Every structure is written in structure tokens, then in C-alpha cells.
Amino acid sequence: MSLTFDNILNFRDVGKTVNDFTMRKVIREGVLYRSARPDDASLADRERLKDELGIRTVIDLRTKTEHLKQAQKRQADLKVPALLQSNAALSEPVQIPGLQYREVKVTGRRFERFLLSQLSWWNYFKLIFLFILGYRMQAISLLGREVMLPRGLVGIGLITMDESGAEVAEALRTFIEPACLPILVHCTQGKDRTGLIVALILMTLNVHTEVIEYDYMLTQKGLEAERETRLEEIRELGLTPDWGDCPGDFVTKVENHVNTKYGGINGYLDSIGFGSSERQQLIEVLRV
């Protein structure tokens, strides 16, 4: 179910994961892959992604801030000879030549506006001043503490569904472009945003909830190797260590939200403009 790489965590073939768990062929294998950020992929990792697995497209769900932080980290790593010696790929472009990259900021402008609208006037102006003065991470940490933390990881996932419909639809449409397949979808940890997109795809394919939960919860183990590093990043966002874990009720609550607010997965997808013909194409691409 999981594939081992030098420097890519939480990588797996979703189709194989589903098929192994159900002990029958349900989803096409070798079409939909998921992982944590592949930015530090070794030369061998890059070769495996492109040549062995034949991945053509990478969907990156991260924010501008996450890209900036990774760029800063890469520049710092390039100044450490030992790191360059251990991973020659650090001197290569982050994006692997020959692959298509789709940057879909799944927590888009409407999502951001919603979060900002939840701040008190005092904290809103404080956040604006922090941004103006160049304290980007401090501003984001303020938003994390005041808005995201009280709503919880699952709550933010549900808000993402409601406020980022256009971005969710954009990500899903990539899967119905034949020239894009196979696809690797990732965010930073490959946990929540990636987990949401994969869960919605599997719900569209009528995969049972327990199977979707199984795939989602594999991430807990998949990220264990760098847990402390990732907890530091989470704290920088003003969040608590539990945001580094996979909530056991994530998939159930997503499904309940879809059913209660939208009358089911088809109702939700209709509401974001991913209509019946596109859903049928998605099913034809991914169902056995």
C-alpha cells in the first residue's frame, strides 16, 4: 500500500490501498497517488516518480506562505555542504523536469476572507499591520490562534469544503484530463487538504466510509519519521500539537456534513460546479 522513498513521506497508491483493504479490485491502481510535500525528493526519488511510476502531473495544494517557507529552507540547505553531499537533488529545480505542475491553493481567497471575517476588529487591524511590516508568519499565527484553533482541524476541513468549492472543483477536473494521468496530489503533510480531496473522490466513486477512513488514517504512521519537525511548523502557525495528528472522526464528519448540508456527495459536487457529466468521467477514469 505504501511505497518507500528516500525523502518523500506518506506516499501511497490510493487505488492499491483501497483494493488491498477490500480484497477486491475497486479502484484502478497506478492512477492516483498521494503524499506529503516532495520538495526534498532525492535523485532516485525523482527517477522513481517519473520513470518507474510514470507520474505525469503533480497537484500542489499548498499556500503561498508554505511555498515561501520551503524556498527559504531550500536556500539554507544549499549552504550546508553535508546536505548537498547527501542529496544532490537539492541543487536541481524543485519541480521535476518533464512533469506538469498544477498549483491549486485549495484554501483560496474566499476561504481566507471567511477566516478574516471571524476576527475581532482589533485582531483584524493587528493582522493587517503585521503583514504590512513584513511579519507574515506572526500574522498567520494570530489567525491560527484566534480563528483556526477554536474551530479545530475537522471544523477547518468543513469550512474548506464550503468556502473553497471552486478550488476543489479545479483539483477534481485535473483527474478527468487524460493527458494528466497518473497524478500525485499533495499538500505539506499530505494529511488534511490532500485527505479531503481524496475522500471526496472516493465518496464520488461510492467507496465505503470505513475504506476511506482506513486510507486517511494511514497518514498517522506515514508522517511519524518527521513528527517533531512538523510539530515545530504547526506551532509556528499558532496551533497545538494535536493538529499534527489524524482525527479519527475526520472522514465521518466530512461525510455527515456532505449529507446534512448538501443532501449527499452529488449535491455537494453540483453546488461547486462539478456536474454529473464530469462525475461520470471521474468514475470512468478511476473505477475498475
Image (cartoon, helix red, strand yellow):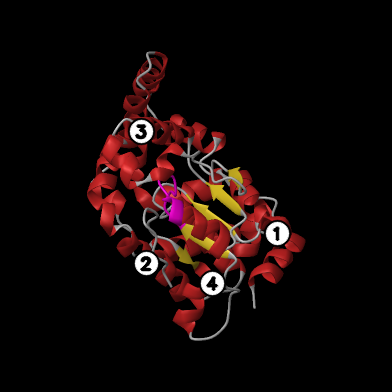
Q: Marks 3 and 2: in contact by CB < 8 Å?
A: no
- Whole-percent x, y for residue 10 in the image: 39, 59
Residue 218: mark: 2
Q: What mark, if any, has residue 241 been given in the picture?
A: none
Determine whether the residue tagged by mark 2 lies in a helix, strand or loop.
Answer: helix
Residue drawn at x 38%, y 24% as measured from the top left: 136
Q: The C terminus appears in which quarter of the rendering?
A: bottom right
* Rendered image quadrant of residue 45: bottom left
Q: Residues within 10 Å of mark 1 (few under 14, many from 20)?
A: some
* Mark linked to residue 78: 3
- Residue 260 screen position, x and y as percent: 53, 61
Residue stretch in magenta: 35-44
Q: What is the x, y in percent for residue 105?
A: 54, 40
Q: Sequence-wise, which precedes: disc 1 or disc 4?
A: 4
Instruction: State yes or no: residue 38 in magenta.
Output: yes
Which of the two labelled residues, at mark 2 and mark 3, occupies the earlier sequence position?
3
Q: Which residue is mark 4?
A: 15
- In the rendered view of the protein, which quadrant contains the N terminus? bottom left
The reply to whether residue 275 is in sight is no
